[in-house]
Image (cartoon, grey):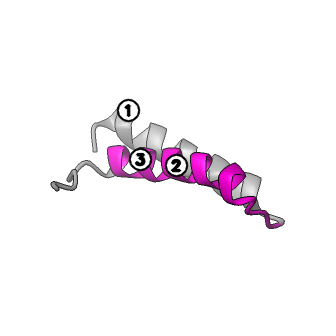
Amino acid sequence: MKVTKNLGMLLLAIWLIATGLIPLLQLSFSGLGTVMAVLAVAAGGLILVGR
């Protein structure tokens, strides 16, 4: 298995996996929405600048 060197795509993959696992495993904590939003913005920004 080859892991991408593109940090934006890696963050996007992490965000997608977390988005799927959170409801499946019924995970919850007080800052969950904020963490997911920051991860999504970081991934999108890095993809836009090509990193």
Q: Nearer the viewer, residue 9 or 3?
A: 3
- Upstream in sequence: badge 1 or badge 3: 3
Residue occupying the far top of the picture:
48
Residue 51: x, y in percent? 28, 45
> SS at mark 2?
helix
C-alpha gap between disc 1 and disc 3: 15 Å
The residue stretch that appears in magenta: 8-29
Residue occupying the far front of the picture:
24
Identified at 41% across, 47% down, the residue is: 13
Magenta span contains residue 17: yes
Mark 3 — residue?
13
Callout 3: few (<14), some (14-19), or many (20+) C-alpha neighbours within 10 Å? some
Which mark is drawn over residue 15? 2
Mark 1 — residue?
48
- Circle nearer the viewer, 1 or 2: 2
| Direction from residue 37 to residue 18 in the image, left or right | left
Which mark is drawn over residue 28? none
Q: Are marks 3 and 2 in contact (CB under 8 Å)?
A: yes
39 versus 28 height, above or below: above
| Direction from residue 3 to residue 49 in the image, left or right | right
Identified at 55% across, 52% down, the residue is: 39
> SS at mark 3?
helix
Q: Main secondary structure of the magenta part?
A: helix
Q: Which quarter of the rendered picture does the N terminus lie within?
A: bottom left
